[in-house]
């Protein structure tokens, strides 16, 4: 049921169907670059069909009690966990991440569904003290309506779950447009949603290799009341412009440029452990991966040597091999970007400590790389690296470190290591980032708010804040009371 050949149709209104045009596109394994499946290449017409289905289903889904919706979500979550191994294999096949990381992502995705099935029952209203005795002021929360979720390839399941679970819990219906590199994971959890009894039209998946056309319909259609997007800041800005035409609610989880500061009083051993976790998770291809190691000048050489030593020990290879710690990059464009950033940095004075260039495992594999002497003249200081290059900067004073960390239009995740309690509060207050890891290199949890400031986005996902993104606040003024 969940093999690539059985995931060749999209899911609209509870029916498995090809694109109206009958066109398809191939899905490739980045480790081998072999085609592993073919899925429908949906266009504007299919998108319209999915929107109509979601709108029809919305009328009845919103009428279910929170408990009914919560029970269905928990059934879906149980099926996802029961199929952890199959889903993880599929994920590794289409995005290349090591199998243990894929298994963790399946559990992470399930944790959002569990969390929001519980939150469904806690969507409370409010009773406001009345301004005069003949009135009662009430506040209730209602689902926004039909939601479109556009998701990236680097977390093929978790990003869908983080959006759809709160949407469904609050009574909204959804249309998912997964990334074209990773449509199979999305179709697989649609199979499980169907099996769990989620009603027809509540959860729809359209696959496409024409994101501009499909995205434009989703973002501008009057029946779609919410766009939740995770991806690059450039595409996010485009969608924001399109969504403005019908004044849609928007949630934007966009790019990052995470600083990772190591102060002179840090516990270096735990900073290195945090640095490896933060930099090399998913081969550096996450929005919260450390992008800039900002290290006190007294530690910089030691830090770079220790980081290089550990980076060199990481096992690079096909993610299906259980030993693998770093899989392939997603495509040739990603490899080209790393080469360009590295070349630019070295031409401007950065020093290669280890790595650099393609790994013998294959054309999309990259050597874990560490460079020092990085500065803000280099492109690597301003772009998301999205790969296994650790760029090390040095600083002298706390003020310099904070200034350097904040010198970016992005504001998603930041990290710092120190053992000084006063500095912990001073620095976390000063950092313009939505999430701050203090003496921690990995901090995501379904219970904590995930999201960014500045050009890293709008809104928060996960936690008790996450469901508000899918709810409208309605004020009722009851008058004429005696
Ligand atoms: P991307 O190119 O922006 O793609 C993300 C999604 O948007 C994909 O489904 C893509 O479809 C679709 N898309 C592309 N052009 C579109 C358009 N004109 N209209 C509508 N949809 C469009 O980003 P990516 O390279 O896949 O992912 C990496 C980016 O995501 C990084 O910047 C990373 O930081 C960010 N990210 C952020 C978070 C977060 O929570 N803040 C989490 C993960 C990733 P196709 O696949 O067909 O191109």
Image (spheres, rainbow, N blue to C red):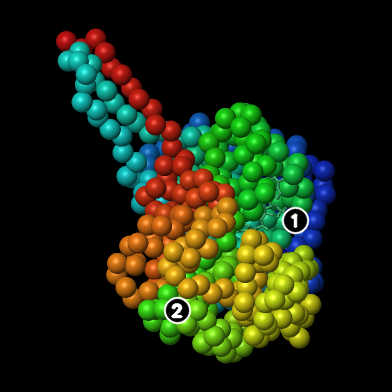
The crowding category of the residue bearing disc 1, from other C-alpha atoms within 10 Å (few below 14, some 14 to 19, many at least 20), is many
Q: Residue at coordinates 20% horizontally, 26% vertically from top-left?
A: 129
For mark 1, what is the residue? 39
Q: Quadrant of residue 148?
A: top right
Q: Quadrant of ligand 1?
A: bottom right
Quarter of the figure with the C terminus = top left
First along the sequence among labels 2 and 1: 1
Q: Which residue corresponds to the image point at 61% horizontal and 28% vertical from the top-left?
A: 246
Residue 152, position as x, y percentages in the image: 63, 56
Q: Determine which residue is flagged by label 2.
A: 271
Give the structural element (helix, strand or loop) at label 2: helix
Q: Is residue 225 above or below residue 136?
A: below
Q: Of circles 2 and 1, which is in front?
A: 2
| Cβ atoms at labels 2 and 1 below 8 Å apart | no
Q: Residue placed farthest to the front in the image?
A: 396
SS at circle 1: strand
Where residue 456 appears, as percent x and y from the top left, is 55, 52
Q: Classify residue 142 as left or right of residue 349.
A: left
**Residue at mark 1: C-beta within 8 A of ligand 1:** no
Residue placed most toward the observer, 92 or 203: 92
Image location (x, y in percent) of residue 172? 49, 39
Q: Residue at x 61, y 79 (%)?
A: 372
The N terminus, quarter of image? bottom right
Quick check: 412 left or right of 369?
Answer: left
User: How far apart are the two marked residues, 2 and 1, measured between alpha carbons?
Assistant: 43 Å
């Amino acid at each position: 049921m969940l093999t690539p050949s059985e995931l060749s149709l999209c899911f609209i209104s509870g029916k498995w169907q090809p694109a109206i045009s009958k066109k398809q596109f191939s899905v490739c394994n980045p480790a081998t670059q072999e085609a592993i499946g073919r899925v429908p290449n949906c266009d504007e017409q299919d998108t319209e069909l999915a929107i109509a289905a979601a709108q029809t289903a919305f009328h009845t889904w919103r009428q279910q009690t929170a408990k009914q919706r919560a029970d269905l979500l928990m059934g879906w979550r149980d099926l996802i966990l029961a199929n952890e191994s199959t889903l993880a294999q599929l994920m590794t096949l289409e995005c290349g991440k090591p199998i243990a990381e894929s298994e963790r992502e399946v559990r992470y995705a399930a944790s959002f569904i569990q969390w929001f099935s519980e939150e469904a029952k806690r969507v409370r209203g409010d009773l406001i003290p009345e301004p005069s005795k003949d009135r009662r002021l009430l506040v209730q929360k209602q689902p926004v309506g039909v939601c479109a979720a556009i998701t990236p390839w680097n977390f093929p399941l978790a990003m869908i779950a983080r959006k759809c679970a709160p949407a469904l819990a609050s009574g909204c219906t959804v249309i998912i447009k997964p990334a074209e590199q990773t449509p199979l994971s999305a179709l697989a959890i649609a199979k499980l949603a169907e099996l769990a009894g989620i009603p027809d039209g509540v959860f729809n998946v359209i696959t496409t290799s024409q994101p501009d056309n499909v995205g434009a319909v989703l973002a501008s259609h009057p029946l779609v009341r919410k766009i939740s997007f995770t991806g690059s800041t450039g595409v996010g800005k485009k969608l924001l412009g399109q969504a403005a035409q019908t004044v849609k609610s928007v949630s934007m989880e966009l790019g990052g440029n995470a600083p990772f500061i190591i102060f002179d009083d840090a516990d270096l051993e735990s900073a290195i452990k945090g640095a490896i976790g933060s930099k090399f998770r998913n081969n550096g291809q996450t929005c919260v991966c450390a992008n800039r190691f900002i290290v006190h000048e007294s530690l910089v050489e030691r830090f770079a040597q220790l980081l290089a030593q550990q980076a060199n020990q990481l096992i690079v290879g096909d993610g299906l091999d259980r030993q693998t710690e770093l899989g392939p990059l997603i495509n040739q464009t990603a490899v080209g970007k790393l080469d360009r950033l590295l070349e630019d940095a070295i031409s401007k004075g950065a020093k290669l400590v280890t790595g650099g260039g393609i790994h013998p495992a294959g054309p999309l594999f990259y050597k874990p790389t560490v460079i020092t002497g990085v500065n803000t003249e280099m492109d690597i200081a301003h772009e998301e690296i999205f790969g296994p290059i650790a760029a090390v900067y040095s600083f002298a004073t706390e003020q310099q470190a904070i200034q350097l960390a904040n010198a970016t239009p992005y504001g998603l995740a930041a990290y710092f290591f120190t053992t000084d309690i006063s500095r912990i509060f001073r620095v976390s207050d000063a950092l313009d980032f939505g999430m701050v890891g203090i003496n921690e290199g990995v901090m995501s949890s379904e219970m904590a708010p995930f999201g960014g400031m500045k050009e890293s986005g709008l809104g928060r996902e996960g936690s008790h804040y996450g469901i508000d993104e899918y709810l409208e606040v309605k004020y009722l003024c009851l008058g004429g009371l005696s």
